[in-house]
Image: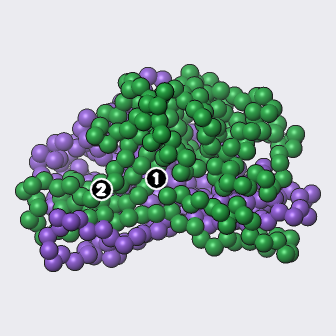
Chain colours: A green, B purple
C-alpha cells in the first residue's frame, strides 16, 4: 500500500484540492515533527491533549504515566486518531475572506493497542525519544523496571490517514486584484535556541551530539 | 471570577504541580497564540483539527466554511473544548524517563453557540483576524454578504479552563546526578521570516503595518 484508501473517516471534505493520501507524503509530515494532538471524550466533551510521538512503519507510539486519564480512555476506543500540524505561515489576502494559513497537517487513524511486551515497549520508548531528538536514547540512562512499570505505551496501528497542505501565496477574487492591499505570506518557522545547560550539570560535559545534530522541525 | 473552579472536567490529573487555574494566566497563554486544536467525534472516533481563533472576554470564536464537518458536529455538542499549545523546548535529562518538554498549554471548556447575529458575527471575524495578525482587519476588504453566508462562526462561551506550564531545567533522580550525561534544555521558538510578497501584488505597495508590528508567537 502506498496510498491510504479514502473512507468517510479520512476523506478531506473541505479544500479537497489540498488533500493528500499518498503514504510517503503523509509520513514525511509526520516524521518532521514530534508533537501530535490526541483527543478523548470525557463525559461527552472531546478534550485535546498535546503529546510526543514516534513512528515505525505503519505504527505510531505515544506514552504517558500509567495513570494518564487520556491514554487509559483511548485504549478503550475501537478507533483513535492523532493529528500533526506544522504552521508554516500566515497568508494575507486582499480580502479578509481569503486569508489563510500555509501549513502541513496529517491525521492518522487506527486501532489503539496497549504495548505490554517488554521488548516492544522499550523499543517504542526509544522510537519516541529518538523522534524527538535523534541519538538521545543512547546518551541517556535507559528506563529501569520501576520506570517502565510507571509508564504506559499506546500503539496506534495506522489503518487510514490523510494530509492537508497549503504552500502558496494569496489567492484573491478577480474583482479584488486592483485593491490597494498588500498580498503575500508571512512565513513562520520553529527555530532552535542555544542549549541551556542545567546549573547542576556535571562539570566538563560538552553539548551532546543529539543537540548538535538536531534536525529541527521544518 | 478570577479563577476557574476545579471540576472533574478541567482538573489537571497528571503533574498537578504545573497546573494553573488563574484566569489571567490561562488567557495570557491563549492570547499569545492564534492556533488551537479542536476535537469532534466522527462515528466513534475523536478527530483533532487545527484552526485559528480569537478571544473576547470569556468567549472564544472560531470559524469555517458553512459546510465544515467539524463545526457542524461540534455545534450539536453540549460542551466542547479548545486546546492551545506553545512548545517552548525539549528537556534533556540524565535519564530517559525524566525527559520532558517545556511548554505552556491551555484547555478551554464551554458551550458551543452558532453566532447568527450579523453584527456579532462580523465582530467575531474581526476578533479572529486581529488575533492572528493585529490590524489586518482594517487593511483588507471586509467580508461581503455572500462571504458571510458561506462562513459559520462558532462561539465557545468559556465555563471552565485550565493551563499547564513547564518552564525549567531537567529534574533527575538523586542517584543519577553523577552520571556523565549532559542535562538541560534545548529551547524552541516560533520565529517570523521575511514577508513573501505575491507576484501579482499591485506595484508600489509596501509591507503593511500589520506585518511590521506583528507580535510574534512567544
Report the chain holding disc 1.
A
Instruction: For label 2, count other residues whose C-alpha is less than 10 Å away and answer few (under 14), some (14-19) or many (20+).
Output: some
Residue at 39% from the left image edge and 24% from the top image edge: A7
Q: Which residue lies most toward the front here? A: A2
Q: Which circle's residue, 2 or 1, is located before the other in the chain?
A: 1
Question: How many numbered marks appear?
Answer: 2
Residue A168 got which mark? 2
Q: Residue A97's spot in the image, x, y percent?
A: 21, 53
Going by the image, does A177 lie left or right of A36? left
Mark 2 and 1 residues: CB-CB less than 8 Å, in contact? Answer: no
Up the image or down, B106 lies above or below A205; here it is above
Q: Secondary structure at mark 2?
A: loop
Asked which quadrant contains residue B102, the reply is bottom right
Up the image or down, A195 lies above or below B175; here it is below
Q: Tell us which disc is closer to us: 2 or 1.
A: 2
Residue B210 visible at all:
yes
Residue A86 got which mark? 1
Q: Secondary structure at mark 1?
A: strand
Q: Residue B127's spot in the image, x, y percent?
A: 30, 58
Residue at 79% from the left image edge and 53% from the top image edge: A138
| Viewer-closest of A94 and B181 | B181
Instruction: For label 1, count other residues whose C-alpha is less than 10 Å away and answer few (under 14), some (14-19) or many (20+).
Output: many
Residue at 48% from the left image edge and 46% from the top image edge: A29
Amino acid at each position: 500500500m502506498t496510498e491510504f484508501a479514502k473512507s468517510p473517516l479520512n476523506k478531506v471534505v473541505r479544500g479537497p484540492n489540498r488533500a493528500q493520501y499518498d503514504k510517503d507524503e503523509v509520513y514525511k509530515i509526520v516524521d518532521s515533527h514530534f508533537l501530535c494532538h490526541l483527543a478523548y471524550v470525557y463525559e461527552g466533551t472531546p478534550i485535546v491533549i498535546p503529546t510526543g510521538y514516534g513512528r515505525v512503519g505503519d505504527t505510531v507510539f505515544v506514552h504517558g504515566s500509567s495513570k494518564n486519564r487520556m491514554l487509559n480512555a483511548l485504549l478503550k476506543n475501537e478507533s483513535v486518531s492523532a493529528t500533526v500540524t506544522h504552521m508554516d505561515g500566515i497568508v494575507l489576502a486582499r480580502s479578509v475572506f481569503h486569508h489563510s494559513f500555509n501549513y502541513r497537517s496529517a491525521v492518522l487513524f487506527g486501532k489503539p493497542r496497549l504495548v505490554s511486551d517488554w521488548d516492544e515497549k522499550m523499543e517504542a520508548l526509544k522510537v519516541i525519544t529518538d523522534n524527538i531528538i535523534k541519538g538521545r536514547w543512547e546518551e541517556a540512562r535507559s528506563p529501569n523496571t520501576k520506570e517502565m512499570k510507571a509508564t504506559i505505551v499506546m500503539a496506534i496501528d495506522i489503518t487510514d490517514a490523510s494530509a492537508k497542505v497549503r504552500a502558496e501565496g494569496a489567492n484573491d477574487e478577480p474583482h479584488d486584484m486592483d485593491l490597494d492591499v498588500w498580498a503575500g505570506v508571512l512565513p513562520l518557522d520553529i527555530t532552535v535556541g542555544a542549549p541551556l545547560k542545567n546549573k547542576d550539570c556535571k562539570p566538563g560535559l560538552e553539548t551532546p551530539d543529539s543537540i548538535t545534530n538536531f534536525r529541527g522541525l521544518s
